[in-house]
Image (cartoon, grey):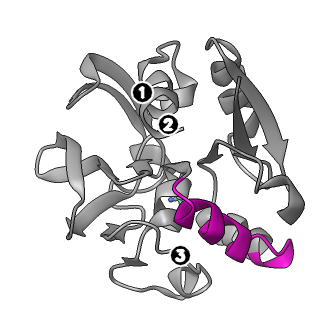
Amino acid sequence: MKRIGVLNLQGAVSEHLTMLAKLDNVKPILVKQPDEIQSLDGLIIPGGESTAISRLIKENGLYDPIKQLAKSGKGIFGTCAGLVLCAKTTTHITQADRTVMPLALIDIVVERNGFGRQVDSFETNLDIVNIGQHIPAVFIRAPYIESFAGNVTPLAYIDDHCVMAESDNILVCSFHPELTGDARIMQYFVDKFC
Ligand code: GLN
């Protein structure tokens, strides 16, 4: 059984649990405390509000344990706000961005809310490298990957905007894969990274 944690601070937590529960050989675990991190085989940082999640990561003393988990080679999957938190930095720094302290797990620069505001939210189908075609994806106040460097591989684009990428043991996407009935992305994360 692979122990896959879902960071239980704010945002789309239960939806990830529901999707993980569909997979074989996965034990989904809610994590909120530093001592719950180390024994995981993988960790999902869900979408929500990156300013709130960042503040709660700091308040709960989770910043270093998550960095440590990544350093030990365990898989980390950041979705939407989770992508913002995994990034090296954000571009066009606004006052709200200043309150986000990214974990710098993957060498990407992120445009927060790059696809616009709540009213600009949309659903589409993506062709994703390594995973498959016509994969449904829900974008809600979604960021995109403005630039990437080092050994980062882009996996999916909308127009010129990179919306999914991976490097070593880190996977990120700027949308919500857990809000659809399609478990292919989650299966990819568990099989390849955890
Ligand atoms: N734009 C939000 C943020 O930066 C992310 C939105 C989401 O996770 N759906 O926190």
From the image, tell me which residue sits under label 1: 188
Local packing at callout 3 (Cα closer than 10 Å; few below 14, some 14-19, many 20+) is many
In the displayed structure image, the side of residue 154 where residue 140 appears, left or right: right
Q: Nearer the viewer, mark 3 or mark 2?
A: 3
Extreme residue toward the left, this view: 160
Q: Is residue 79 magenta?
A: no
From the image, tell me which residue sits under label 3: 102
Q: Which of marks 1 and 3 precedes in the sequence?
A: 3
Q: Position of residue 70 (x, y in %)?
A: 55, 61
Q: Determine whether the residue tagged by mark 1 lies in a helix, strand or loop.
A: helix
Mark 2 residue CB less than 8 A from any atom of ligand 1 = yes
The magenta span reads 58-73
Front residue (pair 184, 125) = 184
Front residue (pair 66, 182) = 66
From the image, tell me which residue sits under label 2: 176
**Distance from the alpha carbon under mark 3 to that under mark 1:** 24 Å
Q: Which of marks 2 and 3 precedes in the sequence?
A: 3
Q: Position of residue 166 (x, y in %)?
A: 32, 50
Amino acid carrying label 2: it is: His
Q: Position of residue 133 (x, y in %)?
A: 22, 17
Amino acid carrying label 1: it is: Tyr
In the displayed structure image, the side of residue 79 where residue 67 appears, left or right: right
Report the magenta stretch's main SS. Answer: helix
* Residue name at image x 24 percent, y 59 percent: 152
Q: Determine whether the residue tagged by mark 2 lies in a helix, strand or loop.
A: loop
